[in-house]
Image (cartoon, coloured by chain):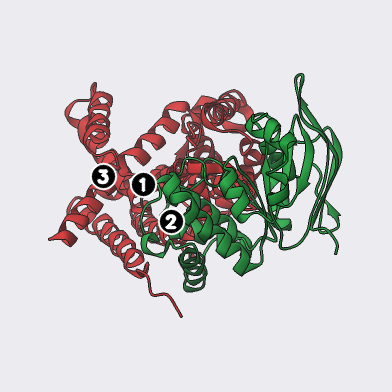
Chain colours: A red, B green
Amino acid sequence: MAYSGPSVCGAFDMVVWQLLALAVAAMALPVAVPWLGFVFTVAIGKGLAALGVAMLLRGGLISIGHALYVAIGAYATAFLMLSIGMNELFLLLICATAITMAAGLVIGAFMARYRAIFFAMLNLAISMVFFTLLSKLYHLTGGSDGMRVATPTVLGLTLDRAEFDLVLQFSAVALMVAVALLIDRYLKSPLGEALTAIHANEVRLEYLGVSARGVILAAYTISAALAGLGGAITAVAIGHVVPELSYWTFSGQLVLIAVLGGITGVPGAFIGAFFFELVRTFAADFAPDAWNAIVGAALLIVIFFLPQGLYGLLQRVKTRKARL
Amino acid sequence: MNPLLSVRDLHISFGGVKAADGVDLDIYPHELIAVIGPNGSGKTTFLNLCTGYIRATRGSVIFEGRSITNEVPRTITRRGIARAFQIPQLFTGHSLIENVMLSVAAQHGIWQAFRPLSREAYRNKAREVLDLMSLGDIAHGPTVNLPEGLRKLADIAIALALKPRLLLLDEPTSGVSTAEKFALMDTIVGVLRAEKVTALFVEHDMDVVERYADRVLVWDAGKVIAGGPPQEILRSSHVLERVIGIG
Protein backbone atom coordinates (compact mmCIF):
# COMPACT_ATOMS: atom_id res chain seq x y z
CA MET A 1 0.00 0.00 0.00
CA ALA A 2 1.36 3.40 -0.92
CA TYR A 3 2.29 5.48 2.07
CA SER A 4 0.84 8.96 2.22
CA GLY A 5 3.13 10.89 4.51
CA PRO A 6 3.43 14.64 4.65
CA SER A 7 4.11 16.16 1.25
CA VAL A 8 7.25 18.17 0.59
CA CYS A 9 5.44 20.17 -2.09
CA GLY A 10 4.28 22.68 0.51
CA ALA A 11 7.85 23.31 1.64
CA PHE A 12 9.03 23.63 -1.97
CA ASP A 13 6.28 26.08 -2.83
CA MET A 14 7.17 28.15 0.21
CA VAL A 15 10.75 28.55 -1.03
CA VAL A 16 9.46 29.58 -4.47
CA TRP A 17 7.22 32.22 -2.92
CA GLN A 18 9.97 33.50 -0.64
CA LEU A 19 12.37 33.81 -3.58
CA LEU A 20 9.75 35.52 -5.73
CA ALA A 21 9.02 37.98 -2.91
CA LEU A 22 12.74 38.68 -2.63
CA ALA A 23 12.96 39.11 -6.42
CA VAL A 24 10.02 41.53 -6.49
CA ALA A 25 11.60 43.57 -3.67
CA ALA A 26 14.97 43.58 -5.47
CA MET A 27 13.33 44.89 -8.65
CA ALA A 28 10.70 47.22 -7.17
CA LEU A 29 12.69 49.07 -4.49
CA PRO A 30 15.23 50.48 -6.99
CA VAL A 31 12.33 52.06 -8.90
CA ALA A 32 11.73 54.30 -5.84
CA VAL A 33 15.39 54.56 -4.83
CA PRO A 34 17.47 54.11 -8.02
CA TRP A 35 20.87 53.76 -6.33
CA LEU A 36 19.58 50.61 -4.61
CA GLY A 37 19.79 48.86 -8.01
CA PHE A 38 23.58 48.71 -7.83
CA VAL A 39 23.53 47.77 -4.13
CA PHE A 40 21.16 44.88 -4.82
CA THR A 41 23.16 43.65 -7.83
CA VAL A 42 26.32 43.50 -5.72
CA ALA A 43 24.28 41.91 -2.91
CA ILE A 44 23.11 39.16 -5.27
CA GLY A 45 26.74 38.51 -6.26
CA LYS A 46 27.66 38.16 -2.61
CA GLY A 47 24.48 36.20 -1.90
CA LEU A 48 25.42 33.61 -4.52
CA ALA A 49 28.88 33.21 -2.96
CA ALA A 50 27.37 33.11 0.55
CA LEU A 51 24.94 30.41 -0.63
CA GLY A 52 28.00 28.32 -1.53
CA VAL A 53 29.44 28.92 1.95
CA ALA A 54 26.05 28.13 3.56
CA MET A 55 25.86 24.85 1.63
CA LEU A 56 29.20 23.76 3.05
CA LEU A 57 28.12 24.89 6.53
CA ARG A 58 25.22 22.43 6.29
CA GLY A 59 27.84 19.72 5.97
CA GLY A 60 29.68 21.11 9.01
CA LEU A 61 32.46 22.60 6.84
CA ILE A 62 33.46 26.21 7.40
CA SER A 63 35.29 27.79 4.49
CA ILE A 64 37.00 31.01 5.45
CA GLY A 65 38.63 31.24 2.04
CA HIS A 66 35.71 31.20 -0.36
CA ALA A 67 36.59 34.68 -1.60
CA LEU A 68 39.16 32.75 -3.65
CA TYR A 69 36.38 31.60 -5.98
CA VAL A 70 34.76 35.02 -6.11
CA ALA A 71 38.13 36.37 -7.25
CA ILE A 72 38.62 33.55 -9.77
CA GLY A 73 35.17 34.27 -11.25
CA ALA A 74 35.84 38.02 -11.33
CA TYR A 75 39.34 37.77 -12.80
CA ALA A 76 38.22 35.09 -15.29
CA THR A 77 35.65 37.62 -16.55
CA ALA A 78 38.32 40.30 -16.90
CA PHE A 79 40.76 37.95 -18.64
CA LEU A 80 38.13 36.55 -21.01
CA MET A 81 37.32 40.09 -22.11
CA LEU A 82 40.93 41.20 -22.35
CA SER A 83 42.58 38.08 -23.76
CA ILE A 84 40.08 36.60 -26.19
CA GLY A 85 37.76 39.54 -26.62
CA MET A 86 34.71 37.76 -25.24
CA ASN A 87 32.28 40.60 -24.76
CA GLU A 88 28.85 39.01 -24.38
CA LEU A 89 27.41 39.28 -20.83
CA PHE A 90 25.75 35.86 -20.59
CA LEU A 91 28.65 34.06 -22.27
CA LEU A 92 31.03 35.75 -19.83
CA LEU A 93 28.93 34.68 -16.85
CA ILE A 94 28.73 31.08 -18.10
CA CYS A 95 32.45 30.80 -18.94
CA ALA A 96 33.62 32.48 -15.72
CA THR A 97 31.37 30.12 -13.72
CA ALA A 98 32.69 27.08 -15.61
CA ILE A 99 36.32 28.14 -15.05
CA THR A 100 35.67 28.63 -11.32
CA MET A 101 33.86 25.32 -11.13
CA ALA A 102 36.87 23.58 -12.70
CA ALA A 103 39.16 25.29 -10.16
CA GLY A 104 36.79 24.20 -7.37
CA LEU A 105 36.90 20.61 -8.63
CA VAL A 106 40.73 20.53 -8.65
CA ILE A 107 41.18 22.27 -5.29
CA GLY A 108 38.20 20.41 -3.82
CA ALA A 109 39.80 17.04 -4.58
CA PHE A 110 42.45 18.06 -2.06
CA MET A 111 40.13 19.87 0.38
CA ALA A 112 37.66 16.98 0.65
CA ARG A 113 40.27 15.07 2.65
CA TYR A 114 40.13 17.57 5.50
CA ARG A 115 37.58 18.52 8.14
CA ALA A 116 37.00 21.15 10.82
CA ILE A 117 39.78 23.67 11.46
CA PHE A 118 42.08 22.08 8.85
CA PHE A 119 39.46 22.56 6.12
CA ALA A 120 38.87 26.16 7.21
CA MET A 121 42.56 27.08 7.41
CA LEU A 122 43.54 25.39 4.13
CA ASN A 123 40.84 27.32 2.30
CA LEU A 124 42.09 30.49 3.92
CA ALA A 125 45.70 29.68 3.00
CA ILE A 126 44.91 29.02 -0.66
CA SER A 127 42.83 32.19 -0.96
CA MET A 128 45.69 34.22 0.54
CA VAL A 129 48.21 32.62 -1.84
CA PHE A 130 45.91 33.63 -4.70
CA PHE A 131 45.60 37.14 -3.25
CA THR A 132 49.38 37.42 -3.18
CA LEU A 133 49.68 36.18 -6.77
CA LEU A 134 47.07 38.69 -7.93
CA SER A 135 48.89 41.48 -6.10
CA LYS A 136 52.41 40.59 -7.21
CA LEU A 137 51.97 39.47 -10.82
CA TYR A 138 51.59 43.07 -11.92
CA HIS A 139 52.25 42.51 -15.63
CA LEU A 140 49.41 39.98 -15.77
CA THR A 141 46.86 41.16 -13.23
CA GLY A 142 47.59 44.84 -12.83
CA GLY A 143 48.77 44.17 -9.27
CA SER A 144 46.98 46.06 -6.54
CA ASP A 145 45.49 48.41 -9.16
CA GLY A 146 43.49 45.51 -10.50
CA MET A 147 41.95 45.20 -13.97
CA ARG A 148 39.25 47.17 -15.68
CA VAL A 149 36.18 45.30 -16.90
CA ALA A 150 34.49 47.04 -19.81
CA THR A 151 30.72 47.13 -20.20
CA PRO A 152 29.79 43.92 -22.07
CA THR A 153 27.18 43.62 -24.79
CA VAL A 154 23.85 41.99 -24.01
CA LEU A 155 22.63 39.52 -26.66
CA GLY A 156 24.74 41.43 -29.18
CA LEU A 157 23.36 44.83 -28.21
CA THR A 158 25.67 47.62 -27.07
CA LEU A 159 24.00 49.47 -24.22
CA ASP A 160 24.97 52.64 -22.42
CA ARG A 161 26.03 52.15 -18.79
CA ALA A 162 22.68 53.06 -17.22
CA GLU A 163 20.79 50.67 -19.52
CA PHE A 164 23.35 47.94 -18.92
CA ASP A 165 23.11 48.36 -15.14
CA LEU A 166 19.35 47.91 -15.34
CA VAL A 167 19.67 44.80 -17.54
CA LEU A 168 22.34 43.41 -15.20
CA GLN A 169 20.15 44.08 -12.18
CA PHE A 170 17.20 42.22 -13.72
CA SER A 171 19.44 39.41 -14.98
CA ALA A 172 21.02 39.05 -11.54
CA VAL A 173 17.58 38.81 -9.95
CA ALA A 174 16.50 36.17 -12.48
CA LEU A 175 19.73 34.25 -11.90
CA MET A 176 19.23 34.48 -8.12
CA VAL A 177 15.80 32.86 -8.38
CA ALA A 178 16.87 30.20 -10.90
CA VAL A 179 20.09 29.23 -9.12
CA ALA A 180 18.43 29.26 -5.68
CA LEU A 181 15.70 26.90 -6.92
CA LEU A 182 18.30 24.56 -8.41
CA ILE A 183 20.30 24.56 -5.17
CA ASP A 184 17.08 24.01 -3.20
CA ARG A 185 16.42 20.91 -5.30
CA TYR A 186 20.01 19.75 -4.84
CA LEU A 187 19.83 20.16 -1.05
CA LYS A 188 16.62 18.12 -0.93
CA SER A 189 18.06 15.39 -3.18
CA PRO A 190 19.82 12.28 -1.83
CA LEU A 191 23.17 13.92 -2.62
CA GLY A 192 22.25 17.12 -0.76
CA GLU A 193 20.77 15.27 2.21
CA ALA A 194 23.93 13.16 2.35
CA LEU A 195 25.90 16.40 2.73
CA THR A 196 23.77 17.35 5.77
CA ALA A 197 24.15 13.79 7.08
CA ILE A 198 27.95 14.14 7.02
CA HIS A 199 27.65 16.84 9.67
CA ALA A 200 25.83 14.43 11.99
CA ASN A 201 27.58 11.14 11.28
CA GLU A 202 30.17 10.65 8.57
CA VAL A 203 30.98 7.10 9.73
CA ARG A 204 27.38 5.97 9.29
CA LEU A 205 27.32 7.45 5.80
CA GLU A 206 30.37 5.38 4.82
CA TYR A 207 28.55 2.34 6.24
CA LEU A 208 25.68 3.06 3.86
CA GLY A 209 28.16 2.55 1.02
CA VAL A 210 28.49 6.27 0.30
CA SER A 211 31.79 8.08 -0.18
CA ALA A 212 31.69 11.05 2.20
CA ARG A 213 34.65 12.51 0.36
CA GLY A 214 32.76 12.29 -2.94
CA VAL A 215 29.72 14.00 -1.43
CA ILE A 216 31.92 16.80 -0.09
CA LEU A 217 33.75 17.18 -3.40
CA ALA A 218 30.43 17.57 -5.24
CA ALA A 219 29.26 20.19 -2.72
CA TYR A 220 32.58 22.01 -2.81
CA THR A 221 32.59 22.17 -6.62
CA ILE A 222 29.02 23.48 -6.71
CA SER A 223 29.81 26.04 -4.00
CA ALA A 224 32.87 27.20 -5.96
CA ALA A 225 30.71 27.60 -9.08
CA LEU A 226 28.21 29.70 -7.10
CA ALA A 227 31.00 31.94 -5.80
CA GLY A 228 32.44 32.19 -9.32
CA LEU A 229 29.09 33.31 -10.71
CA GLY A 230 28.84 35.82 -7.86
CA GLY A 231 32.34 37.06 -8.70
CA ALA A 232 31.51 37.44 -12.40
CA ILE A 233 28.35 39.44 -11.60
CA THR A 234 30.36 41.61 -9.18
CA ALA A 235 33.05 42.19 -11.82
CA VAL A 236 30.67 43.41 -14.52
CA ALA A 237 28.61 45.41 -11.99
CA ILE A 238 31.60 47.28 -10.57
CA GLY A 239 33.57 47.34 -13.84
CA HIS A 240 36.79 46.69 -12.02
CA VAL A 241 38.44 43.73 -10.30
CA VAL A 242 41.02 43.99 -7.52
CA PRO A 243 43.03 41.44 -5.49
CA GLU A 244 40.98 42.31 -2.36
CA LEU A 245 38.24 40.13 -3.80
CA SER A 246 40.39 37.20 -2.66
CA TYR A 247 41.37 38.72 0.70
CA TRP A 248 40.44 36.95 3.93
CA THR A 249 38.19 39.78 5.11
CA PHE A 250 35.99 39.23 2.05
CA SER A 251 35.82 35.50 2.89
CA GLY A 252 34.81 36.54 6.39
CA GLN A 253 32.04 38.68 4.94
CA LEU A 254 30.67 35.66 3.08
CA VAL A 255 30.58 33.54 6.26
CA LEU A 256 28.99 36.47 8.10
CA ILE A 257 26.31 36.83 5.40
CA ALA A 258 25.60 33.08 5.45
CA VAL A 259 25.22 33.10 9.26
CA LEU A 260 23.22 36.36 9.26
CA GLY A 261 20.82 35.02 6.66
CA GLY A 262 20.67 31.49 8.05
CA ILE A 263 21.62 28.20 6.47
CA THR A 264 18.35 26.31 6.85
CA GLY A 265 16.96 27.50 3.52
CA VAL A 266 18.40 28.87 0.27
CA PRO A 267 16.69 32.28 0.53
CA GLY A 268 18.70 32.85 3.74
CA ALA A 269 21.95 33.65 1.91
CA PHE A 270 20.24 36.33 -0.20
CA ILE A 271 18.29 37.77 2.74
CA GLY A 272 21.61 37.96 4.60
CA ALA A 273 23.32 39.60 1.60
CA PHE A 274 20.59 42.25 1.15
CA PHE A 275 20.58 42.94 4.89
CA PHE A 276 24.37 43.14 5.03
CA GLU A 277 24.69 45.45 2.03
CA LEU A 278 21.91 47.74 3.26
CA VAL A 279 23.32 47.94 6.80
CA ARG A 280 26.78 48.52 5.38
CA THR A 281 25.60 51.19 2.94
CA PHE A 282 23.56 53.11 5.53
CA ALA A 283 26.17 52.62 8.28
CA ALA A 284 28.92 53.88 5.96
CA ASP A 285 26.76 56.90 5.18
CA PHE A 286 25.85 57.80 8.76
CA ALA A 287 28.95 56.56 10.58
CA PRO A 288 31.75 56.11 8.04
CA ASP A 289 34.34 55.19 10.68
CA ALA A 290 32.14 52.79 12.55
CA TRP A 291 30.32 50.73 9.93
CA ASN A 292 32.28 47.61 10.86
CA ALA A 293 31.16 47.98 14.47
CA ILE A 294 27.52 48.37 13.37
CA VAL A 295 27.71 45.27 11.17
CA GLY A 296 29.44 43.41 14.01
CA ALA A 297 26.70 44.45 16.44
CA ALA A 298 24.05 43.25 13.97
CA LEU A 299 25.80 39.89 13.80
CA LEU A 300 25.95 39.62 17.59
CA ILE A 301 22.23 40.35 17.84
CA VAL A 302 21.48 37.66 15.26
CA ILE A 303 23.72 35.10 16.98
CA PHE A 304 22.16 35.75 20.40
CA PHE A 305 18.53 36.14 19.42
CA LEU A 306 18.24 34.42 16.03
CA PRO A 307 20.56 31.41 16.01
CA GLN A 308 18.86 30.22 12.79
CA GLY A 309 19.54 33.61 11.16
CA LEU A 310 17.06 36.00 9.56
CA TYR A 311 15.58 33.17 7.51
CA GLY A 312 15.00 31.29 10.77
CA LEU A 313 12.94 34.26 11.93
CA LEU A 314 10.71 33.87 8.86
CA GLN A 315 10.30 30.17 9.59
CA ARG A 316 9.51 30.88 13.24
CA VAL A 317 6.75 33.31 12.21
CA LYS A 318 5.41 30.72 9.77
CA THR A 319 5.38 28.01 12.46
CA ARG A 320 3.57 30.30 14.92
CA LYS A 321 0.94 31.15 12.31
CA ALA A 322 0.44 27.45 11.59
CA ARG A 323 -0.10 26.77 15.32
CA LEU A 324 -2.77 29.48 15.64
CA MET B 1 26.53 -25.50 0.98
CA ASN B 2 29.07 -22.75 0.25
CA PRO B 3 29.77 -20.39 3.13
CA LEU B 4 28.54 -16.82 2.81
CA LEU B 5 31.56 -15.49 4.67
CA SER B 6 34.89 -17.28 5.14
CA VAL B 7 37.60 -15.94 7.39
CA ARG B 8 41.04 -17.52 7.30
CA ASP B 9 44.05 -16.96 9.53
CA LEU B 10 43.02 -13.39 10.43
CA HIS B 11 45.55 -11.47 12.51
CA ILE B 12 45.76 -8.04 14.07
CA SER B 13 47.49 -6.74 17.19
CA PHE B 14 47.25 -3.47 19.10
CA GLY B 15 50.63 -3.10 20.74
CA GLY B 16 51.14 -6.34 22.61
CA VAL B 17 47.45 -7.28 22.58
CA LYS B 18 46.43 -9.83 19.95
CA ALA B 19 42.86 -8.89 19.03
CA ALA B 20 42.71 -11.43 16.20
CA ASP B 21 45.18 -14.29 16.43
CA GLY B 22 44.60 -16.61 13.51
CA VAL B 23 40.79 -16.49 13.37
CA ASP B 24 39.23 -19.14 11.11
CA LEU B 25 35.49 -19.39 10.64
CA ASP B 26 32.69 -19.88 8.13
CA ILE B 27 29.22 -18.37 8.21
CA TYR B 28 26.52 -20.11 6.17
CA PRO B 29 23.43 -18.56 4.59
CA HIS B 30 20.45 -17.94 6.90
CA GLU B 31 22.42 -18.65 10.08
CA LEU B 32 22.02 -16.53 13.18
CA ILE B 33 25.33 -16.67 14.99
CA ALA B 34 26.12 -15.31 18.42
CA VAL B 35 29.65 -14.28 19.33
CA ILE B 36 30.45 -14.40 23.04
CA GLY B 37 33.61 -13.85 25.01
CA PRO B 38 35.14 -11.79 27.79
CA ASN B 39 35.73 -8.06 27.39
CA GLY B 40 38.77 -7.37 25.22
CA SER B 41 38.72 -10.79 23.58
CA GLY B 42 38.44 -9.29 20.07
CA LYS B 43 34.73 -9.62 19.27
CA THR B 44 34.16 -6.05 18.11
CA THR B 45 37.58 -6.05 16.43
CA PHE B 46 36.36 -8.99 14.37
CA LEU B 47 33.36 -6.93 13.19
CA ASN B 48 35.70 -4.02 12.46
CA LEU B 49 37.95 -6.27 10.38
CA CYS B 50 35.04 -7.78 8.44
CA THR B 51 33.60 -4.33 7.64
CA GLY B 52 36.88 -2.64 6.75
CA TYR B 53 37.02 -0.24 9.68
CA ILE B 54 40.48 -1.58 10.51
CA ARG B 55 42.91 -3.56 8.36
CA ALA B 56 44.20 -7.02 9.15
CA THR B 57 47.95 -7.53 9.24
CA ARG B 58 47.49 -11.06 7.86
CA GLY B 59 44.73 -13.35 6.68
CA SER B 60 41.72 -13.13 4.42
CA VAL B 61 38.00 -12.38 4.50
CA ILE B 62 36.01 -13.89 1.64
CA PHE B 63 32.39 -12.88 1.07
CA GLU B 64 30.29 -14.77 -1.49
CA GLY B 65 33.46 -16.19 -2.99
CA ARG B 66 35.26 -12.86 -3.44
CA SER B 67 37.92 -11.33 -1.24
CA ILE B 68 36.94 -8.27 0.75
CA THR B 69 40.12 -8.30 2.82
CA ASN B 70 41.15 -4.74 3.71
CA GLU B 71 38.52 -3.13 1.49
CA VAL B 72 37.06 0.15 2.80
CA PRO B 73 33.67 0.11 4.63
CA ARG B 74 31.68 1.62 1.74
CA THR B 75 32.95 -1.02 -0.72
CA ILE B 76 32.13 -3.83 1.70
CA THR B 77 28.68 -2.35 2.33
CA ARG B 78 28.01 -2.22 -1.40
CA ARG B 79 29.02 -5.87 -1.62
CA GLY B 80 26.21 -6.81 0.79
CA ILE B 81 27.46 -6.63 4.39
CA ALA B 82 25.69 -4.14 6.64
CA ARG B 83 26.45 -3.24 10.20
CA ALA B 84 24.64 -2.02 13.30
CA PHE B 85 26.68 -0.53 16.11
CA GLN B 86 26.89 -0.94 19.87
CA ILE B 87 26.29 2.81 20.14
CA PRO B 88 23.58 3.43 17.51
CA GLN B 89 24.86 5.58 14.64
CA LEU B 90 22.02 7.79 13.45
CA PHE B 91 21.77 11.00 11.46
CA THR B 92 20.51 13.15 14.29
CA GLY B 93 19.64 16.10 12.06
CA HIS B 94 17.12 13.99 10.15
CA SER B 95 13.85 12.37 11.16
CA LEU B 96 13.75 8.60 11.54
CA ILE B 97 12.12 8.01 8.17
CA GLU B 98 14.68 10.30 6.51
CA ASN B 99 17.46 8.23 8.09
CA VAL B 100 16.03 5.11 6.49
CA MET B 101 15.28 6.91 3.19
CA LEU B 102 18.95 7.90 2.99
CA SER B 103 19.78 4.24 3.36
CA VAL B 104 17.30 3.30 0.63
CA ALA B 105 18.74 6.05 -1.59
CA ALA B 106 22.28 4.83 -0.91
CA GLN B 107 21.26 1.41 -2.16
CA HIS B 108 19.87 2.88 -5.39
CA GLY B 109 22.74 5.33 -5.93
CA ILE B 110 23.22 8.51 -3.98
CA TRP B 111 24.37 10.51 -7.01
CA GLN B 112 21.06 12.06 -7.79
CA ALA B 113 21.30 15.81 -7.44
CA PHE B 114 17.92 17.01 -8.64
CA ARG B 115 15.35 14.35 -7.71
CA PRO B 116 14.09 14.66 -4.13
CA LEU B 117 15.08 12.19 -1.43
CA SER B 118 11.55 12.47 -0.14
CA ARG B 119 9.97 10.72 -3.12
CA GLU B 120 7.10 8.26 -2.93
CA ALA B 121 9.13 5.15 -3.81
CA TYR B 122 11.80 5.80 -1.17
CA ARG B 123 9.18 6.74 1.42
CA ASN B 124 7.27 3.53 0.87
CA LYS B 125 10.38 1.37 1.10
CA ALA B 126 11.55 3.16 4.23
CA ARG B 127 8.08 2.88 5.74
CA GLU B 128 8.04 -0.87 5.02
CA VAL B 129 11.29 -1.38 6.91
CA LEU B 130 10.15 0.81 9.82
CA ASP B 131 6.86 -1.05 10.07
CA LEU B 132 8.73 -4.37 10.11
CA MET B 133 10.85 -3.04 12.98
CA SER B 134 7.72 -1.77 14.80
CA LEU B 135 8.94 1.82 14.39
CA GLY B 136 6.15 3.04 12.10
CA ASP B 137 4.50 5.15 14.79
CA ILE B 138 7.57 7.31 15.33
CA ALA B 139 8.68 7.44 11.68
CA HIS B 140 8.39 11.20 11.35
CA GLY B 141 9.85 12.07 14.74
CA PRO B 142 13.42 13.15 15.44
CA THR B 143 15.99 10.51 16.32
CA VAL B 144 17.92 12.56 18.80
CA ASN B 145 15.78 11.90 21.89
CA LEU B 146 14.75 8.31 21.25
CA PRO B 147 15.15 5.80 24.12
CA GLU B 148 18.08 3.41 23.72
CA GLY B 149 15.96 0.42 22.69
CA LEU B 150 14.34 2.39 19.86
CA ARG B 151 17.71 3.85 18.84
CA LYS B 152 19.03 0.30 18.53
CA LEU B 153 16.06 -0.70 16.37
CA ALA B 154 16.48 2.45 14.27
CA ASP B 155 20.17 1.68 13.72
CA ILE B 156 19.28 -1.84 12.61
CA ALA B 157 16.46 -0.52 10.39
CA ILE B 158 18.98 1.71 8.59
CA ALA B 159 21.22 -1.32 8.05
CA LEU B 160 18.33 -3.53 6.89
CA ALA B 161 17.15 -0.93 4.37
CA LEU B 162 20.37 -1.65 2.49
CA LYS B 163 19.01 -5.18 1.82
CA PRO B 164 22.19 -6.86 3.05
CA ARG B 165 22.94 -10.55 2.70
CA LEU B 166 24.91 -10.45 5.95
CA LEU B 167 24.18 -8.22 8.94
CA LEU B 168 26.71 -7.75 11.73
CA LEU B 169 25.24 -6.55 15.03
CA ASP B 170 27.37 -5.33 17.90
CA GLU B 171 25.65 -5.95 21.24
CA PRO B 172 22.06 -5.29 20.17
CA THR B 173 20.73 -5.50 23.74
CA SER B 174 23.39 -3.45 25.53
CA GLY B 175 21.93 -0.44 27.32
CA VAL B 176 18.43 -1.93 27.07
CA SER B 177 16.51 -2.87 30.21
CA THR B 178 15.99 -6.54 31.10
CA ALA B 179 12.27 -6.10 30.60
CA GLU B 180 12.76 -4.82 27.04
CA LYS B 181 15.57 -6.97 25.73
CA PHE B 182 13.50 -10.02 24.73
CA ALA B 183 10.90 -7.87 23.00
CA LEU B 184 13.72 -6.10 21.18
CA MET B 185 15.34 -9.37 20.13
CA ASP B 186 11.97 -10.86 19.12
CA THR B 187 11.53 -7.94 16.74
CA ILE B 188 15.06 -8.10 15.36
CA VAL B 189 15.16 -11.88 14.92
CA GLY B 190 11.64 -11.92 13.49
CA VAL B 191 12.70 -9.49 10.77
CA LEU B 192 15.97 -11.32 10.08
CA ARG B 193 14.13 -14.62 9.66
CA ALA B 194 11.37 -13.07 7.54
CA GLU B 195 13.83 -11.28 5.29
CA LYS B 196 16.18 -14.30 5.19
CA VAL B 197 19.15 -12.20 6.29
CA THR B 198 22.15 -14.03 7.68
CA ALA B 199 23.36 -12.37 10.86
CA LEU B 200 26.12 -12.46 13.40
CA PHE B 201 25.66 -10.69 16.72
CA VAL B 202 28.06 -9.98 19.53
CA GLU B 203 26.31 -10.52 22.85
CA HIS B 204 27.05 -10.64 26.57
CA ASP B 205 23.63 -11.80 27.73
CA MET B 206 23.64 -15.61 27.78
CA ASP B 207 19.83 -15.79 28.03
CA VAL B 208 19.59 -13.91 24.75
CA VAL B 209 22.25 -16.10 23.17
CA GLU B 210 20.56 -19.32 24.25
CA ARG B 211 17.14 -18.17 23.11
CA TYR B 212 17.97 -16.77 19.66
CA ALA B 213 21.27 -18.09 18.27
CA ASP B 214 21.54 -21.06 15.91
CA ARG B 215 25.24 -21.32 16.64
CA VAL B 216 27.60 -19.78 19.16
CA LEU B 217 31.24 -18.85 18.64
CA VAL B 218 33.35 -18.32 21.73
CA TRP B 219 36.13 -15.75 21.53
CA ASP B 220 39.10 -15.54 23.86
CA ALA B 221 42.34 -13.60 23.39
CA GLY B 222 41.69 -13.10 19.69
CA LYS B 223 40.90 -16.77 19.01
CA VAL B 224 37.73 -18.77 18.45
CA ILE B 225 38.09 -21.33 21.24
CA ALA B 226 34.77 -23.12 20.75
CA GLY B 227 31.76 -23.20 18.45
CA GLY B 228 28.49 -25.08 18.25
CA PRO B 229 24.81 -25.05 19.21
CA PRO B 230 24.00 -22.84 22.22
CA GLN B 231 22.63 -25.73 24.31
CA GLU B 232 25.98 -27.47 24.01
CA ILE B 233 28.33 -24.49 24.21
CA LEU B 234 26.64 -22.79 27.15
CA ARG B 235 26.91 -25.96 29.22
CA SER B 236 30.60 -26.46 28.58
CA SER B 237 32.52 -25.90 31.82
CA HIS B 238 35.52 -24.62 29.84
CA VAL B 239 33.37 -21.97 28.12
CA LEU B 240 31.62 -20.99 31.34
CA GLU B 241 34.97 -20.55 33.04
CA ARG B 242 36.45 -18.44 30.24
CA VAL B 243 33.42 -16.31 29.41
CA ILE B 244 31.43 -15.98 32.62
CA GLY B 245 34.13 -16.79 35.14
CA ILE B 246 32.27 -19.76 36.68
CA GLY B 247 34.86 -22.45 37.45
Q: Which image quadrant: the C terminus of chain A?
A: bottom left
Compared to residue B69, the image places residue B182 above or below, namely: below
Query: On screen, A15 above or below A135?
Result: below
Name the mark nearer the viewer: 3 or 2.
2
What x and y, as percent, mark residue A102?
A: 64, 47
Q: State the CA–CA distance, disc 1 to disc 3.
A: 9 Å
Which-is-in-front pick, marks 1 and 3? 3
Contact, mark 1 vs mark 3 (Cβ under 8 Å): no
**Residue A272 appears left or right of A146:** left
Residue at 50% x, 66% y: name it.
B132
Question: CA gap, disc 2 to disc 1?
Answer: 28 Å
Q: In the rendering, at what x and y percent does residue B242 appear?
A: 70, 31
Find disc 2 in the rendering and name its residue: B96
Q: Chain of mark 2?
A: B
* Position above or below: A58 against B221: below
Question: Hey, what amino acid is under mark 3?
Answer: Leu
Which residue is tagged 3?
A310
Q: Are marks 1 and 3 on the same chain?
A: yes
Q: Are marks 3 and 2 on the same chain?
A: no
Q: What SS does tag 3 mark?
A: helix
Chain for disc number 1: A
Near-viewer residue (B30 or B91): B30
Residue B207 visible somewhere in the drawing: yes
Q: What percent of the width, then of the height, locates residue B25?
A: 82, 47
Per the image, the residue denoted by label 1 is: A269
Residue B155 image point, x, y percent: 52, 51
Q: Earlier in the sequence, mark 1 or mark 3?
A: 1
Q: Give amino acid for label 1.
A: Ala
SS for dot 2: helix
